[in-house]
Image: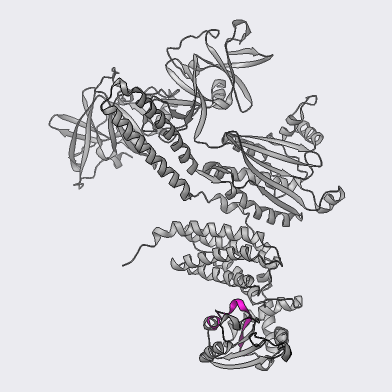
Amino acid sequence: MKSENQPSPNDKEVNQFLTFELAGDSYAVEILKVQEIRGWEPVRKIPNTPGFIKGALNLRGTIVPVLDLRERFGLENVEYTPVTVVIVLSINNNDHPMVLGVIADTVSDVLDLNLADIKPAPNFGVNIDTRYMRGIYVAKQGMIMLLDVDKLLDVDDLTKIESLL
Amino acid sequence: MSIDMAQFHQVFFEESFEGLDIMESGLLNLSPGEPDSEAINSIFRAAHSIKGGSGTFGFTEISDFTHVMETLMDEMRDGRRQITQAAVNLLLGSVDCLREMLFAVKEGQAIDAERVAEHKHALDLEQQKSGSSQQDKSLSAHEPLSNQAHQSDSKVIGWHIAFSPHTDLLKTGNDPVRMFRELSVLGELEVTADFRGVPDFYQLDPEECHLSWNLVLKGDIDRAPIDEAFAWVEDDCDLAIQPLYQADDLSLLVPGAENQVSANRAQHPAAEHVVQAGVSKPAEISTPVVIKEKAPGDEAKNKGSTSIRVDTSKIDTLINMVGELVITQSMLSLIGEHFDMSKQDQLKNGLAQLERHTRELQESVMNIRMMPINSVFSRFSRLVHDLSNKLGKKIDLKLIGEHTEVDKTVVELISDPLVHLVRNSLDHGIEMPDERVAVGKPETGTVTLEAYHRGGNIVIEVSDDGKGLDKDRLRAKAIEKGLLDEDAILTDKQTFELIFMPGFSTAEQLTDISGRGVGMDVVRRNIQALGGNIEIISELGKGSTISIHLPLTLAILDGQSIAVGDETYIVPLGSIIESLHIKEERINRVADKGETFLLRSEYLPIIRMHEIFKVPNVKTTKLSEGLLVVVEGQGVRCGLFVDDLLGQQQVVIKSLEANYRRIEGVSGATILGDGSVALILDIPGLVRLANQ
């Protein structure tokens, strides 16, 4: 599983990534997975789900679950502000396309990254599971953690976590 | 330039399967002996389009096979061949075979060549029986075989053509002499005229044709050009074209001996030899009813088509509506541009118009998903035809209201439960013919399938005039199986409902048609899953009627919104019995766990919505200050404790599973007028959740 996430060294391909911030750290997701970015608006709670699932959002008639990445990663919770954004991602969950929203502090930039420059993720300990990391990119302003959204938002996985709670 | 034909495959398959359905229902409507030209024509047309389509797409096996069927039907159409039950059954079998072939091609699998060959062979045999094959039975069974064997063993050296024009042939501008001249170009032609039909000189009308001819055309000639020569007169004559083989003695073909030809041939030494060779494979002429092994439902199940055929008029209505909507929108934006209070009335009118158009638009869009229930019903003629043969019963199927329109999803999902109910009626309901006669009923039983609209529901009824349900036996059986207490008092309705209990089957012996354990309980569960219910009325000796009530559409629901804390939920209106405030003294607490309340001498459990869904900020947690909504789901009643009732509205059901997963106690979500999401409660799920 892990070896799949590591880029092969002869990968010269350049991909675009959307970077965003969570508690002062930079994260990035592949831009092709991003469907749209919208401002935070109250969502409808879904009963009996883990706390990081904030609820369901009406995305032009489609019901989309919204996740708080801070809570997901065990970071400190903050009040949502006018700059809080919801990044709507179209992911692939076991060959089943899904749309999910993730809450981030702010969206920063779009970066062109050479896939070969992506370093494998080190072990962070308990809070951030490296299974969800595609790797790390070192930019001038600091480290950017690249998320593998298909794995990060794997709903079956979330359900498993929920059953442990 | 090459065109990628694959892009049209989907359409071809859809049309072909549709064509097969037409052929099937047409064949079932054919009654032996009475050629109904319109019915045969429609079957023929369907076959012809399948042949044409498959030829175009290069599915040669299919076009070849269809060609054989088509030829046979062509002869029936022209009245050259009598319509016999055997032939109809054979064609039905071939339709099945064709459907399998199409399915195989569609799925990219190999065609079962053996099965196809078997059918084709049977068709060839049938075709070679001469038009009015009223000959001796044994002869007609052997004779075609010899022909068949001939065709593969020896070379065609010519053709014998019996041509007897109708009297008005000449008036249509056709000249036999010209046709003969055309034939003579193909090979050596011998023409013998038969004068026997010519009337007395004084009665003779010189413009009528009373002659008939026997032609022998020798040479290595294909049949096609011969057919072509007669193409213009096909409908105005009796024509029989038969191949001649090396072994055939041409002297047999004397004028007037035509109807003895086949008999003579069978006695011919050379032919006899071939007959014996052919007899070693008698299985190939087994009856077509046996060839059909698969249940007709099998293919139907796999047919979950994803596209929908819509009446053009429905689309036109839709386009009109959208046009109106655009006009209203531009009117409103004009008002909005320079708005002042003087335009308030205009604005109100505009908004009212907008509302009307939106509602109409919604209705016509929903209408697109509606399709006639006929697409389900039409399958049953075949089922009844096959099953009644198998059971040895005489059964008529009556379809009423087959043009009633239902949501596409309902049509797809109702099929299996209906098959089950109809099978039950055929197997257990209708008695054997002699039993029926003994009790003074007509020998032929009737099973009726009826569909109609009532209120916002569609009702589908399956009724039979069979023996009906025996209440005492049902009761005894339920007690025996431990499903019922011996001293239980049941109304008639409750007694009949026993058959919906799991593990209940009164069938004395299990047949492969019904009574296999998975029974009416599954049917009921399927129907309930569609949001409907099922009822049974029966009278011993007179028959039973099973009615299924289903919502017209599965996409829209009448809902009651309720408030719990800051949350809004939707309760399906159909499951609400009443809402009430309760007094403290009517509440019972059982060991600090469950709470029940007394409602008209019945204790109902209370489900506190704020607890079960962990909702904060509720108005009150005191039962006497809130509101109880009494709901019923799958036969269980309970009271939901909520803050308030908000309002009733129609809601569009959205899936929560599409992007997330199923949540226990929630059947889906919807979007409220203010754009926010509300969850729709699933009452049986809530009860399960509360019991955990």
**Extreme residue in the top direction:** B585
Instruction: State the image quarter where residue A53 is shown.
Output: top left
The residue lying at 78 percent from left, 45 percent from top is B466
Name the colour scheme. one colour
Q: Which residues are magenta?
A: B226-246
Quarter residue A47 falls in: top left
Which residue corresponds to the image point at 41% horizontal and 22% vertical from the top-left?
A45
Left or right of B523? Residue B661 is left
Q: Quadrant of the N terminus of chain B?
A: bottom left
Give the left or right position of residue A94, taking residue B383 as reference: left
For residue B482, say whether it is visible: no
In this picture, is B599 found above or below A129? above
Q: Is residue B387 above or below residue B456?
A: below
- From this view, report whether residue B237 is shown above or below residue B371: below
> Which is more toward the observer, B650 or B38?
B38
Q: Residue at x 65, y 91 (%)?
A: B193
Q: Is residue B544 visible?
A: yes
**Coordinates of residue B642 in the picture (x, y in percent):** 51, 15
Residue B179's spot in the image, x, y percent? 55, 87
Relative to B490, say whether B357 is above or below: below
**Residue B488 rendering spot, x and y as whole percentages:** 78, 24
Q: Is residue B241 magenta?
A: yes
The reply, left or right, for residue B240 in relation to residue B566 is right
Q: Nearer the viewer, residue B144 or B643?
A: B643
